[in-house]
Amino acid sequence: MPESPTPSKPDDPGLTQPPRWLAAVLLPAVGAALLWWNLDGWMHPIIDYGRELYVPWRITEGEAPYRDIAYFNGPLSPYVNATWFSLLGVSLRTLTLANYAVIAGVTALLYRLLAELADRMTALCGGIAFLSLFAFQMVEPMANFNWVSPYSHEATHGVALGLSAIACVTRFARVGALRWLTAAGLLAGGSFLTKPEVCLATLLAVAAGVATGARRAGAPALGRQLAVLGIGLLVPVAAAWALLATAMPAGMAWRGTLGGWVHLFDGRLAQLRYYAECMGVDDLGKSLAATAFWAAHLVGALLLITGLAFAFRRGRATAPVLVALAVAPAALLLFIEVPWAHPFRPLGLVTAGILGALVRARIRGGATPRNVLRVAFATFATALLLKIALNVRFHHYGFALAMPAAMLGLAALLSWLPRAVARRGASAAVFRAGSLGLLCLTVCGFLATEADRFGKASRVLGPGPDSFRTNPKSAMARHLTQSVAWLRAHTPPDATVLVLPEGITVNYFARRRNPTGHINFMPPEVIMFGEQAILAALQAHPPDYVVVLHRPTREYGLPLFGTDYGRSILHWVGRTYREVHAIGAEPLHANRLKDKMSGMVILRRPG
């Protein structure tokens, strides 16, 4: 495919661009500052992240997901993290350093994509926004929804693979070498081994990019392109199955290769209240009203900025005016408190609208590499929001799923819309300065919230390279420390331990193996693997010790393990084990349903 010249941008005298060297200096400095601000202050002591540590640790000890560990995501991330453990040692610090490398790579990739998608100013601001609003974010109290300690590495690895595939499709559109399309297929195939929602977005983005550039290829050339892409997609999937099949039966290896795709259409999971709330369909009327409310705010802000752009027409805006527009909105934080869980709800509508506009522009402007990139990126951003469609936010799942959409929105605010108003006689510089003000307001608001979280994270847990900081007032963090210390002091190194209903971090920090393969007993896992099958695994491989901790699960609509679900499992534990140590209040009591997570008991199997 021959390369066509990239159309030059219209003359916008008000849209000056930062020098290229500034990003190379400023983005690493921002990342280093955010890292240092809360060094070792990541991860929740009990929820989610223990799985991200335990599974790769056990891989380094010769165990395998799906065969020895009940794992429901694709195999890519645990084996990548196990490789890091093998190279640098098993520790939280090793995984954190690996995630820093992912953050650095994604920041550089976003800068390159946004510079071509829009311009260098957008790319610079997008890099800063990624680092401050997503990568090092701590707005969510759980501390597992950022790129340093993601609740699931499949989310961050998958998004990184998706962005890389888009970059390869764009490069193919530019130079026409099939090796770039092969690389895009391999990366998209790799995303199949992470999470279904991320893979689906990647596949749609790659397909949209190829379709956008298809006008420039005849039928035979297009057939070759699709064949190359298809082979690239299949190679990682086939390789994963073949490697897993060396350690387990072929059918089990295939199920492991499919990962989350096996459970994608399980209606029982979709009925859990947690996932309905994440998508915003638990109360559809309320979600639609909130989306409309914040959409009206966005439209109002854009109308105000547009009015200022016409008031200060091209060439009449002074530097002080531009600075005031860019910085003054952040001062609003002194007088108002923004509920950061809600303002981004209309983002799905925004990205869908941008995608439609870009498709129309592609039809008018032809299959240029820039149009290929824009359509592919907008498709990726829109598809990723499907899981949180009516409850879009930058924290929680949004740290990964909403990030590309935020970058797309920045491209519109800082580049495309300023140029559009300039063509109608307004000041592009003023419009962009006002848009920078909105970005400044958001970044400052997030940093202010995070400063409060960081300030509370002063207690150090975990030994040496496994240490991390958490809130000293957290009873669960204190009880985690006490339980790990007790297990290390009173059990032999080869003792086996089971934690109910959640808390595989106890196993990891105590370096005690779970013999059953089932490492989490929350409602989704009990549904996916089956309560009776789990009970049978426990009876076949009973652990030496069981730790029962107080972990209410109201968010799923099933408040307590052992009462609302998992009754047969807890009943078997009660009949088979005897209490040997208690920490805090008695766990899993209905009259303590509203308590925060605290209290646990350690039980031992007689004999």
Image: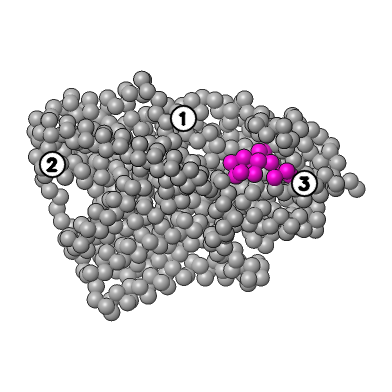
590 or 220, nearer to the observer: 590
Q: Are marks 3 and 2 in contact (CB under 8 Å)?
A: no
User: Mark 3 highlights which residue?
Assistant: 570
Q: Crowding near pointer 2: few (<14 within 10 Å), some, many (20+)? A: many
User: Mark 1 highlights which residue?
Assistant: 450
* Picture coordinates of residue 89, whole percent (x, y): 60, 47
Q: Secondary structure at mark 2?
A: helix
Would you say 122 lies left or right of 560 here? Answer: left
User: Mark 2 highlights which residue?
Assistant: 422
* Picture coordinates of residue 533, whole percent (x, y): 73, 59
Instruction: Answer with mark 3 or mark 1, whichever residue precedes in sequence.
Output: 1
At a point 18% along the width and 36% down the height, the residue shown is 306
Specify the segment rendered in magenta: 551-564
- Rendering quarter of residue 41: top right
- Rendering quarter of residue 344: top left
At a point 77% along the width and 58% down the height, the residue shown is 536
Would you say 149 lies left or right of 443 here? Answer: right
510 or 600, nearer to the observer: 600
* Vertical comparison of 442 with 351: above or below: above
